Structure formats: C-alpha cells, structure tokens
Amino acid sequence: MNIDLLIHNASQILTLAGGPQPGHDLGNLEVVENGALAINDEKIIAVGPSPELSKKYKATQEIDAAGRVVMPGFVDPHTHLIWAGDRAAEFEMRLAGASYMEILNAGGGILSTVRLTRSASVDDLVAQARGRLNRMLSHGTTTAEVKTGYGLETETELRMMEAILRLDTENPVELIPTFLGAHAIPSEFSDDPVGYTDLICDEMLPSLVQWWEENATERSLPFVDVFCETGAFNLDQSRRILERAKELGFQLKIHADEFDGLGGTGLAVELGATSADHLVRTPKEDIKTLGASKTVAVSLPCTPFGLAESDYTPAKAILEAGGILALATDLNPGTAWCESMQFPIALACRYMHLTPSQAIAAATINAAAAVARADTVGSLEPEKQADVLIIDTPDYRHLGYRFGVNLISTVIKRGKIVFSRGGEEII
Ligand code: NIG
Ligand code: FE
C-alpha cells in the first residue's frame, strides 16, 4: 500500500494507546520496540515492528529514526501564551522577599501585564507571542491551550482571543482557546469585586458568545476559566462565573488551590469542569472528590519552581484517589516563563515523585484529556492525528532524567515535518 510517510527503525515507539490513564494506571506507555509508524493523509494508519511495516508500506517519504525514541507530540493544557512586555523587575523584587500575591495586591503582577496588554494591538500581541510559540513547537508541543486574561475588560479580552485564533492559523501548533476574563480584579474595580463579577456574567460572557458567532462559527466555543484565590475571585464569585458560563454552553476550567485551598476543586467537580489546575494546597476532601471524577488534575510544577517555593502538587495522593493527572507549563510572564514541556516533566519526576513514564503519560494522553482532545491527539493509534516527536535519545527515560536542554530531534504535525534539527548525533 502507498502511504505519505513511514518512520522506521525507532528504538522505542511510545504509543500511549488505550486512552487517558487514571490513578495507578498512569505510566502505561505501550512501547513497541524497534518500531515503525505509518502515516497517510495527516493520520496514523499503523504502528508496529519496523521490519513488518517496512515490507507492507511503500512511502513517498521515509524517515530513519536511527535508534531514537518516537512518541506523541506534547499537549500543553495550560498556558498564558499571549501577553505584552515582561516582569523581569518583579522577579528581582521576589528574590528580595516580596511575595507574588503582595505584588499583585499592590497593583503589580498580573495587573502590570494588563496595563501593557491593554495598549497593544492584535498585531503587537501576535508579534510578541510568535517567538514563544515557535519555541514551544521546537521543544515538542504540538497542541496547546492558550488563555486570555490580561485584558480584564471586554475589548482587550476579545483582542487577545483574536490574537490566539490568528496564531492558530499561522503556526503548526494547534491552539485551544480559553477565556480568562476572571484572572484578577482590575484596578478600576479594586473596591468592587462583586461589580466586576457582575460585569463578567452580564456583559463579557454574552459578548464572547456573540463575538464567537461572528468570528469563529466553525470552531467550538472556548473554555472559560477562573482564578479562584484569596485576592482574586473567592469561591462564591468563581461559582457565579462558572455557572453562568456553563449556562451559556462553555466548557469549564479553574485555577484552584495555588496558594489557598478555597474549595475551587470541589466546585470544578460539581460543575463537571474539564480540568482543575495548580492544585498545590488542595484539601484532602477535594482530592477524594476529584479522584472519583472525570475532571482532570492539571499540575503546573514550573510555577512553584518559578516562585522558588517548595510545595508542589501532591501527585501521589491524587493518583491514589484515582485522579487523572496531567502536566502543563503554565507559560506566563509572572511565575513560569517556560515554553518547554520537557522541564515540567523533569520537575515532576523530582518534586512530585513521578517516574518518567508517568510524567510522559501526564504530558501527552492525559494532557489531551485536560483539553477534551483525547479522541484526536495525545497517543499514536490508528485514526489519530499524526502529531509525532522523534527524541534524540535511545531510551524514553532520558525525558525527566536530563533537563535544561532540548532533546527534540524532529516534530511532525498532522503528518508534516514542522521542525527538524537535522544532522544531530544521537546522545
Ligand atoms: O497560572 N495564578 C494565576 N495566573 C497565572 C500567573 C499569571 C501571571 O502572573 O501573569 C498562573 O500561575
Ligand atoms: Fe495559569
């Protein structure tokens, strides 16, 4: 049979076949040794032993993986890719002892990025995010969720949304948009968080529905997310926003338990949210509830690392409770400017005590579940999109074991080579 592309001679193909992996099932990579991958028409058509597939298929293009690892593209299910400026000065303030929430409550932090983002055009926002998105791609991310949330008023939030959709069309990385108008209380509402909550429910969310009908009818509605935290949105305000979003037909996400366990995770489960993210200070009861649900637990280890804090997501407890654990970068200018999914994998192995195979599953098939895309991406199985990485190592455990360098050799999105370092020696 004639096909578009055959990748052969892989030391290990990590297929991640079988769907999202809850609890102690996490880490089942379904490895094919000396494997090959047959791709046609942007999709995977077969995975199996190299000699067998090489005999069966005649490919227009062949890639000799030369003993490297082949695996699904990373899915990064939590990023704040779009912003203007940087916060290097605040990084120094934090090193000198100021806390992240103190800086925010004094009008800096997220609010300083909001000031710069409000004065940026869509072109500016796209131009500033483009380099970051290309870095995500070259580090192996083939699908990523991207949030708004540096506008905090309808017009800028929609401008951010337009920038996300534009980058999605110009870059191979597939972007999944999320509306995060509830990222912080803007300065003009600093004495009236309830007033801003009303604005989100009564004006911003309905405007988003209308904007979507006019600008993105062919796409499903974005996710809606809330930063449920002391100093941002309390549990009542988070509930109002998410309930209104649900009523309007949006799928839900939440930033919960980053600094305080306010009950956001329990709320996410109650409302059937697709994911609950951060989960550092999650109360025991909420871990139990989460574990018994389909809501994906998205851990963001770059964030405590970026803030030089010592507490990470209690991954073992979440897995013991049966939870579906995923990893993401949380790419943002305040706490975690990191484009590479390889780094949270390395952190999760050390500080969350995951094995490399568990961290890899959390960064692929479970991360796909965190953005409701486990049916199309996150594993290498017939009928799925051909989003494939060739890693410049002979053994998958080098992901996690090694850090601070890019181990990606080739990135393939929907069957096309979109990044290749070429000529590199293995190891
Ligand atoms: O997920 N915690 C809230 N939001 C982001 C940080 C955004 C920022 O500081 O600009 C997060 O960590
Ligand atoms: Fe975030």
Image: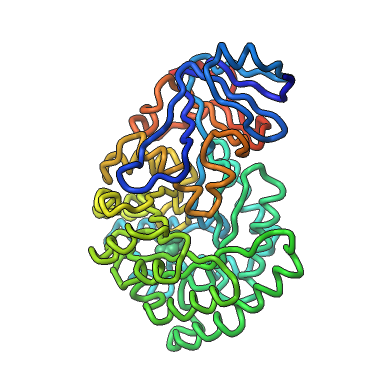
Position of 231 relative to 360 (above/below): below
Tell which of 174 and 93 is nearer to you. 174
Residue 156 lies left or right of residue 400; in this view the side is right
Residue 109 in which image quadrant: bottom left
Residue 250 lies left or right of residue 194; in this view the side is right
Residue 406 lies left or right of residue 101; in this view the side is right
* Quadrant of the rendering where the N terminus is positioned: top right
Q: Residue at x 54, y 72 (%)?
A: 181
Position of 51 relative to 328 (above/below): above
Residue 145 image point, x, y percent = 54, 54
Q: Residue at x 56, y 46 (%)?
A: 375
Which of the colour schemes (rainbow, by chain, secondary structure, one colour) is used?
A: rainbow
* Quadrant of the rendering where the C terminus is positioned: top left
Q: Residue at x 48, y 35 (%)?
A: 17
Instruction: Please say whether residue 98 is visible from this viewpoint.
Output: no
Residue 410 image point, x, y percent = 57, 28
Position of 337 relative to 84 (above/below): above
| Quadrant of the rendered image holding ligand 2 | bottom left
Tell which of 276 and 328 is nearer to you. 276
Instruction: Please say whether residue 150 is visible from this viewpoint.
Output: yes
Residue 229 in which image quadrant: bottom left
Q: Residue at x 50, y 66 (%)?
A: 252
Residue 184 image point, x, y percent = 46, 73
Tell which of 15 and 167 is nearer to you. 15
Residue 110 image point, x, y percent = 46, 67
